[in-house]
Image (cartoon, rainbow, N blue to C red):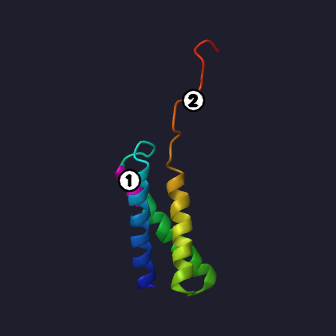
């Protein structure tokens, strides 16, 4: 269980780092992105561990990656301004 939690934390940190490096202009501050990635990974690991009932480390890490990416995707802002007209 400890190895799964530690591995999930590392995966969450890595995914948050990649998101911050690739999309700095579309994400909020790093102070929000990093904990979101880690919390998503830990929650995903918990869900898979509860569903599989002490399953393999690979399955837990797949769940951690999935939920962490989904959590980080909720932070992404639109690329440009919305096309609203001043006359409308």
Is residue 6 shown above or below 54?
above
Look at the image and say whether residue 27 sits in the magenta stretch.
no
SS for dot 1: helix
Which quadrant of the figure contains the C terminus? top right
Q: Where residue 59 sits: x, y (%)?
A: 57, 80
Is residue 50 shown above or below 76?
below
Q: Are marks 2 and 1 in contact (CB under 8 Å)?
A: no
Is residue 16 shown above or below 45?
above
Give the extent of the magenta segment.
30-35
Which one is in front in this view, the residue at disc 2 or the one at disc 1? Answer: 1
Of the pair 44 and 56, the residue shown nearer to us: 56
Q: Quadrant of residue 52?
A: bottom right
Q: Quadrant of residue 16?
A: bottom left
Q: CA distance from mark 2 to mark 1?
A: 25 Å
Q: Where residue 18 sits: x, y (%)?
A: 41, 59
The residue at the point 41 percent across, 45 percent down is 28
User: In the rendered view, does 47 fall on the left or right side of 75?
Assistant: right
User: In the rendered view, does 32 fall on the left or right side of 50?
Assistant: left
Q: Main secondary structure of the magenta part?
A: helix
Q: Residues within 10 Å of mark 1 (few under 14, many from 20)?
A: few
The residue at the point 58 percent across, 77 percent down is 48
Circle nearer the N terminus (2, 1): 1
Residue picked out by circle 2? 82
Residue picked out by circle 1? 21
Q: Where residue 6 sits: x, y (%)?
A: 39, 78
The residue at the point 45 percent across, 64 percent down is 39
Residue 81 marker: none
């Amino acid at each position: 269980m400890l190895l799964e939690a530690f591995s999930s934390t590392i995966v969450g940190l890595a995914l948050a780092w990649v998101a911050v490096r690739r999309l700095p202009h579309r994400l909020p501050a790093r102070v929000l992105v990093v904990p979101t990635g880690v919390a998503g990974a830990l929650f995903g690991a918990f869900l898979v561990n509860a569903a599989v009932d002490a399953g393999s480390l690979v399955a837990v890490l797949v769940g951690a990656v999935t939920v962490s990416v989904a959590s980080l995707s909720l932070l992404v802002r639109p690329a440009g301004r919305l096309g609203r007209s001043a006359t409308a």
